[in-house]
Image (spheres, rainbow, N blue to C red):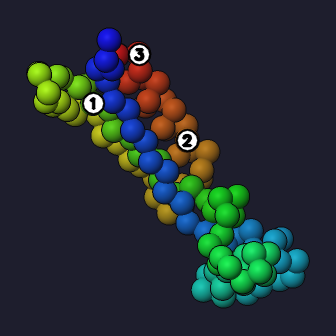
Amino acid sequence: MQHQSLFVFDIETVPDTDAVPNLVGHDVSGDVTERREALENYHLDVTGGKNAFPRQPFHKVVAVSFLAAEIHREGRHETYYLKELRTGGTAQSPESDLWAVFINSSTAIAHVW
């Protein structure tokens, strides 16, 4: 039997500039641009100049979104009926709040299916 439900989630992150002083071992100004530059320089250093993109542990979650849909099939065609589409948070939302809302919402959806 084929699946009749679709659940997709997406996590949006930004570089965690608050972690930069601990990462680089010295104080960096509070300016976000300078901290991002220090973070990129750190990653360039540890990758031998190959990659400035901060690894996942050096990111913070700023949004968790999900889509829930029913799949209806007729012959070779599929139709998706949107049941739920959510995202949440603000730039000031703690990561723990974002995850709590996601887990509570997605758990409620799972019980309906």
Residue closest to the far front: 76
Q: Nearer the viewer, residue 98 or 70?
A: 70
Q: Is residue 96 above or below residue 41?
A: above
Where residue 33 is drawn, which disc sits there? none
Q: Residues within 10 Å of mark 3 (few under 14, many from 20)?
A: few
What is the three-letter code of the residue carrying label 3? His
Image coordinates of residue 69 in percent, x first then y, are 27, 30
Q: Residues within 10 Å of mark 1 (few under 14, many from 20)?
A: some
Image coordinates of residue 47 in percent, x first then y, are 75, 75
Which residue, given by chain and number where applicable, does mark 2 sit on? 99
Q: Residue at x 60, y 50 (%)?
A: 95
What is the three-letter code of the residue carrying label 2? Trp
Q: Secondary structure at mark 2?
A: helix
Gap in angstroms between the C-alphas marked 3 and 1:
14 Å
First in residue order: circle 3 vs circle 1: 1
What is the three-letter code of the residue carrying label 1? Ala
Residue 35 visible at all = no
Residue 6 visible at all = yes
Q: Secondary structure at mark 3?
A: helix
Q: Nearer the viewer, residue 97 or 86?
A: 86
Which quadrant holds residue 96?
top right
Q: Is residue 100 left or right of residue 66?
A: right
Q: Residue at x 32, y 24 (%)?
A: 5
Q: Is residue 26 left or right of residue 88?
A: right
Which residue, given by chain and number where applicable, does mark 3 sit on? 111
Q: Residues within 10 Å of mark 2 (few under 14, many from 20)?
A: some
Gap in angstroms between the C-alphas marked 3 and 2:
18 Å
Quarter of the picture containing the N terminus is top left
Image coordinates of residue 113 in percent, x first then y, are 34, 16
Which residue, given by chain and number where applicable, does mark 1 sit on? 69
Q: Residue at x 49, y 29 (%)?
A: 104
